[in-house]
Amino acid sequence: MYAVVGCSDCQALKIVEGRPETTQCPRCGKRRKFEKLKKFVETDDEDHAREVRSSMLANRQGEGEAFAELDSFTEMEAQIEEAGPSDDEYLEASGVDTEAVAEAAERVENRSASTRGTSQKETVMAALRELDRPTEDEVVAFAEERGVPADYVRKSLEKLARRGEVSESRGRYRLL
C-alpha cells in the first residue's frame, strides 16, 4: 500500500509505503501520526502514487498541462532502456572486452570469504542478517560455503549470545 500524503506545516508531498505508526516530513522534519496525515490517494501501485504526487507538484507550479502531455513513469523508464547503446555495446566501443570482464566478475564471486577480505566474524554476522531466524546448522552451512570452518562458527555463535549481540531461542538465532 502506498499513500500520497501532505505535511500540514510546510505542504510538502511525499509517498509513504505501508502504514507506519508515524512518519517524518522530509522537508521540515515534523513527525506526525500516519492516521492524522491528509491522504490524497491510497493505492497498491507505486507508479500510480508517483504519478499522482508528480501531477500535484506540477499543478502547484502551474505546469499541469505540460505534465499531462508527458508519458507515464513506466513508459518513460522503458524509453530510457531503449535509448542509446546498451552497457555492453558502450564498453565494447570503448575497447573493453566484456566477456573477459564477465569472467573476472564470476571468478571474484566464487572466491572464499577469506580471500575477499571478509573476516570470519563478518561472515557469521552476514549469515545472521541474511537468513531468517537460522538454526546453528544453517549458519554453519552459510559460513562453510564462504570458507569459514564450522568450529569457528559454533564458537562465534556462543560468544555472540554471551555478549548479548544475538539471541537464541529454541535453536534459532537472531541479531539484536
Image (tube, grey):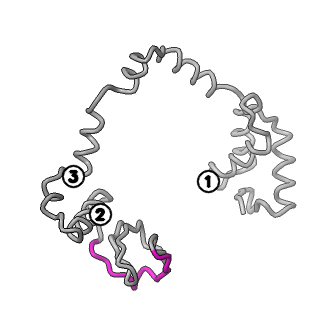
Q: Secondary structure at mark 1?
A: loop
**Residue 62 image offset from top left, x and y in percent:** 18, 68
Q: CA distance from mark 1 to mark 3?
A: 37 Å
Give the secondary structure at mark 2: helix
Residue 3, percent from left and from top: 34, 70
Please tell me whether residue 161 is drawn above or below residue 153 in the rendered image: below
* Residue shown at the point (47%, 17%) measured from the top left: 98
Q: Which mark is residue 132?
A: 1
Q: Quadrant of residue 55?
A: bottom left
Q: 10 Å neighbourhood of mark 1: few (<14), some, or many (≥20)?
A: few
| Residue drawn where x is 43% and y is 79% of the image | 34
Q: How many marks?
A: 3
Q: Nearer the viewer, mark 1 or mark 3?
A: 3
Which is nearer the N-term, disc 1 or disc 3? 3
Three-letter code, disc 2: Ala
The residue positioned 84% from the left and 48% from the top of the image is 156
Residue type highlighted by circle 1: Asp
Instruction: Tell me the distance, in whole angstroms, between the alpha carbons under discs 1 and 2.
Output: 31 Å
CB under 8 Å between discs 1 and 3: no
| Residue 72: numbered disc | 3
* Residue 57 is covered by the magenta coloring: no
Q: Earlier in the sequence, mark 1 or mark 2?
A: 2
| Quadrant of image for the N terminus | bottom left
How many residues crowd around disc 3 within 10 Å: few (fewer than 14), some, or many (20 or more)?
Answer: some
Residue where numbered disc 2 is placed: 49
**First to last magenta residue range:** 28-41
The answer to which of 105 and 143 lies nearer the viewer is: 105
* Image spot of residue 36 (x, y percent): 39, 85
Quadrant containing the C terminus is bottom right
Residue 71 spot, x, y in % from top left: 18, 50
Q: Quadrant of residue 51?
A: bottom left
